Image (tube, rainbow, N blue to C red):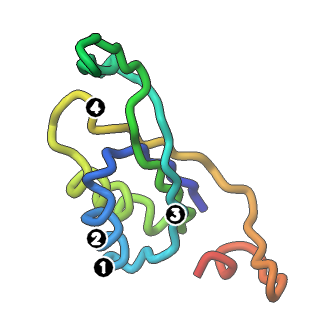
Amino acid sequence: MKKIEAIIKPSKLKAVQAALIEADIPCMTVAPVKGAGLQRGYSEIYRGTEKSMILLNKILIICVVSDENLEKCIKVFMDHASEGKTGDGKIFIYDVQDAIRLRTGTRGIEAIR
């Protein structure tokens, strides 16, 4: 099993969510986050004063998938979240040792199906 954490632009959330559901990867956790990367923030003028905004609004999507669905999940993010520009986001992949469904006590790959 793999845990995928994808940080994407908020405007891409609906497209990614719909594509994950279509790819039969319906389970996800979504959280609003703020961060900075290569994009290095932006400047805006507020009441005549220029403000430097270092942390940008992003969306964090977490999915735990089987090893067989890993590449399919990555492809969804690459196809639906990327514009080919700085600031598109990042994908992080981790090994998951075990998963347990609280309701039934089911463990392993069956817990994420």
Asked if residue 46 lies left or right of residue 113, the reply is: left
| Name of the residue lying farthest toward the front | 47
Where residue 22 is drawn, which disc sits there?
1
Closer to the observer: label 3 or label 2? 2
Gap between marks 1 and 2 measured at Cα: 5 Å
Mark 1 residue crowding within 10 angstroms, few (<14) / some (14–19) / many (20+): few
Gap between marks 3 and 2 measured at Cα: 19 Å
Query: In this orientation, which residue lies closer to the viewer: 99 or 56?
Result: 56
User: The disc labelled 2 sits on which kind of residue?
Assistant: Ala
CB contact under 8 Å: marks 4 and 2: no
Which secondary structure lies at badge 1? helix
Q: Quadrant of residue 54?
A: top left
Q: In the image, what residue occupies the spot 40% across and 42% down?
A: 58
User: The disc labelled 1 sits on which kind of residue?
Assistant: Glu
Closer to the observer: label 3 or label 1? 1
Q: Quadrant of residue 7?
A: top left
Gap between marks 1 and 4 measured at Cα: 26 Å
CB contact under 8 Å: marks 1 and 2: yes
Query: In this orientation, which residue lies closer to the viewer: 66 or 46?
Result: 46
Where residue 67 is drawn, which disc sits there?
3
In the rendered image, the vertical position of residue 20 relative to residue 9, given as above or below: below
Where residue 19 is drawn, which disc sits there?
2
